[in-house]
Image: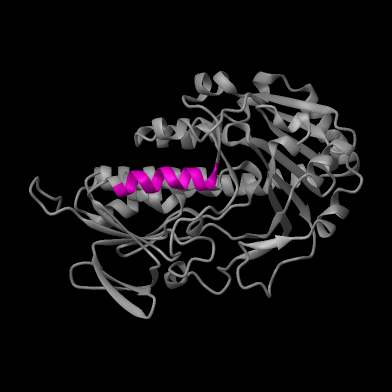
Amino acid sequence: MGAGPSAKPLHVVIAGGGIGGLTAALALAQAGLRVTALERAPGFEEVGAGLQLAPNAVRRLRALGLMPALERPSLRPELVRIRGAGDSAEIARIPLGPIAELRWGAPYLVIHRADLLGVLVAACKAHPAIDIMTGTEVVGFAATAGGVEVAARRGAETLRIAADCVIAADGVRSRLRERFGLGFADRPVWSGRTAWRALVPAAQAPDFARKLETGLWLGPRAHLVHYPLRQGDSINVVAISEDAWRADDAPDIWSISGDLTALSPAFARWSPDARGLIAAAPEWRRWPLFDRAPASRWTVPRVGLLGDAAHPMLPFLGQGAGQAIEDASALAAAFQGHPGDVAAALAAYQAARAARAAAVVVASRRQGAIYHLRGPMALARNLVMKRHSANQMLSRLDWLYGE
């Protein structure tokens, strides 16, 4: 039975205060629900590096009223320039800038993760229906007669929070997903790749890296991505290589310092331009990339998965944040379409998102394999790209950015 006009709004607890969790909090609150977002970190700090926000994500952020706040901290690359690693020669380019907005209904943005998170935190704190609790980790849930009880840990204290629904936005190693009974095989799997991330001060970066564009360099078993951030003051650099390192003994895989001597061998035969940009980085952070199959079931009674908890993906299409934002939008739409009916809303949410997210996961894996080709296969890839017109390059992205 649907809720009447004077019914008390549903209360949703969101486990995780990352981009997906906070976007969901804002979207649900704007849809008329009451939200408590629980983030295990003690605060929202300056962590992470650059993000690419493609038009499919930006359209949804715009619908939440966030574009004015996003304008200042973001940039709009004019194009993606694809180069060969060995000689710096241009293979292809994909126009963005005004073309992206005309074709896909929103701009293509690059932004520091901390800046996007800051915009979301400010919007959530300004909304009277949202309560954010930091330093609080969700550790479990249990069904009750009329809803669900959430168990959370805050320091030495255990909290019990009554809710109508729980959304697990707690990442690739989601503790709540473990409660879905998806089987022993449902666990993160090491991909055999490492992502190295750095911010290079613009004054120390080569001229080509300071241009208002995204650079993509393709080499054997490795690739490099860079673009300017924060009004061009710094350059975000991501180097991804295949190696045997998986950080099994690291207490926190998200904040591991990287040694340039470990990175350099994968790029030793690259052009002086690319190696110069890599050498300009004052420090590196190193992440082992883990893959995980999309959840076969996104919901159990009164609990749903969102973002990396539902469908973690390798970063080769730049869609990790974008797909979490799509989830948040679809979740709010499902609750609007089924007011007061949690079961129907969660079922509609899964139906709207599962196939789409799985397709992006598969496409991201495939793109990584294409990027890291070598020998004759790499030459064939480059030849195909060179023969594609700008419109052909854009049309290959319509399914992803135009959705």
| Residue shown at the point (79%, 65%) measured from the top left | 244
| Residue shown at the point (46%, 64%) measured from the top left | 41
Left or right: where does residue 172 sit relative to residue 163? Answer: right
Q: Nearer the viewer, residue 196 or 232?
A: 232
Res. 360 image quadrant: top right
Q: Which residues are magenta?
A: 112-125
Q: Position of residue 110 (x, y in %)?
A: 57, 36
Q: Nearer the viewer, residue 253 or 390?
A: 253
Q: Position of residue 231 (x, y in %)?
A: 58, 31
| Residue shown at the point (70%, 69%) measured from the top left | 247
Task: Note whether 351 is above or below 193 in the view shown.
Answer: above
Task: Note whether 373 is above or below 346 in the view shown.
Answer: above
Q: Nearer the viewer, residue 209 or 11?
A: 209
Res. 330 image quadrant: top left
Magenta region includes residue 118 = yes
Q: Position of residue 394 (x, y in %)?
A: 63, 25
In this rendering, does residue 104 appear at all? yes
Query: Across the whole image, how many numbered discs are drawn on residues?
Result: 0
Most distant residue in the bottom direction: 156
Most distant residue in the left direction: 6
Res. 375 image quadrant: top right
Q: Position of residue 353 (x, y in %)?
A: 44, 47
Task: Note whether 246 is above or below 70 in the view shown.
Answer: below
| Residue shown at the point (18%, 72%) measured from the top left | 145
Magenta region includes residue 260 = no
In this rendering, does residue 191 appear at all? no
Q: How is the image coloured?
A: one colour
Q: Main secondary structure of the magenta part?
A: helix
Q: Nearer the viewer, residue 350 or 48?
A: 48
